[in-house]
Amino acid sequence: MFNYLAPTYVQAFIQAALAEDIGDGDHTSLSTVPADANGTAQLLVKDRGILAGVELSLAIFKEVDASLQVKVFIHDGIWIEPGQVVLEVTGSSQSILKAERLVLNCMQRMSGIATYTRSLVNILEGTRAKLLDTRKTTPNFRLAEKWACKIGGAVNHRYGLFDMILIKDNHVDFAGGIQAALEKAFTYNASLPEPLAIEIEVRNEDELDQVLAIGGVQRIMLDNFSPDRLRAAIRKIDGRFVTEASGGINEKTLRAYGETGVDYISVGALTHQVKSLDLSLKAK
């Protein structure tokens, strides 16, 4: 799988976010805080949940000013409570202020995602099903959101359109049906230097039967199947392909889907229906 957490990608994400926020300069800090002023600030917890974004915050502080010194007291993936101190940063006051909002925006959003993700992972405990994230992410913030899902215990699905072939309903309809879509995908895949994994979405039992007759894929996504229909479909697939359930699955229905024997369950709400956790960065 594409390594979106490679240092070069993390750095590029941070640089773009800083450019968006700082522009031609942090004029408030430049006008009010002496250039040679030094200080210390603490990242304080004001909410309950799973902490995420600490490693990213360290990279942000380093990108803003490599001379900043950061002490970490609580790491990613740990449950946090109000009043705790996550980290302490010391150095140029202007640099701390430059980094402040990006650190908080990332960590608050990531912690909210990780917290919700962990709650769903806990619901699936004891089943074979693994929770998957999706591409329903905020534009230009996917790296952080996928990272948060991973910290919360989910399995990252494809990062983007480039790292697997996932034939969904619109692809099938535009291609002219299941068989036409698969044949085109097989031909295209054979032309690549390194063939990609192929997954196909099916909307009903007829489409499933067509895929089973053709084969050649690695995973079948069963979309908007009820738990009972999903269980019957999985029996029919009989371990020949990896299975994934999708389509409006939430915390109320998740356990029933997990108990069907499906391998993966994808939930778009992990990244598009989440409340951020309240954190603050305060001068000490």
Image: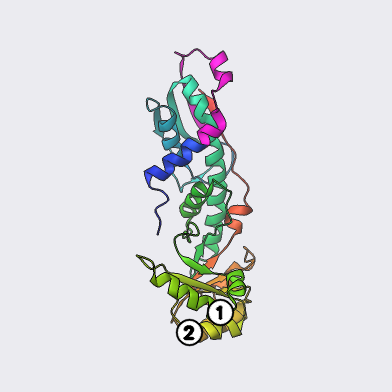
Asked if disc 2 and disc 1 are in contact, CB closer than 8 Å, the reply is: yes
For image coordinates 50% across by 52% down, the residue present is 146
Q: Which mark is residue 44?
A: none
Q: CA distance from mark 2 to mark 1?
A: 9 Å
Whether residue 281 can be seen here: no
For image coordinates 55% across by 57% down, the residue present is 135
Whether residue 169 can be seen here: yes
Q: Which mark is residue 178?
A: 1
**Residue 89, quarter of picture:** top left
The residue lying toward the viewer, choosing from 80 and 267, is: 267
Residue furthest out toward the left: 193
Question: What segment carries the magenta color?
Answer: 17-43
- Up the image or down, 130 lies above or below 210; here it is above
Q: Which residue is mark 2?
A: 214
**Residue 187, quarter of picture:** bottom left
Q: Position of residue 178 (x, y in %)?
A: 56, 79
Secondary structure, mark 2, is helix
Secondary structure, mark 1, is helix
- Quadrant where the N terminus is found in the figure: bottom left
- Up the image or down, 229 lies above or below 196; here it is below
The question of residue 154 being in magenta is answered with: no
- Up the image or down, 168 lies above or below 119; here it is below
Decide: few, some or many residues near mark 2? Use Cα within 10 Å; few <14, some 14-19, many ≥20: few
Q: Position of residue 88 (x, y in %)?
A: 45, 29
Q: Amino acid at mark 2?
A: Ile
Decide: few, some or many residues near mark 1? Use Cα within 10 Å; few <14, some 14-19, many ≥20: many
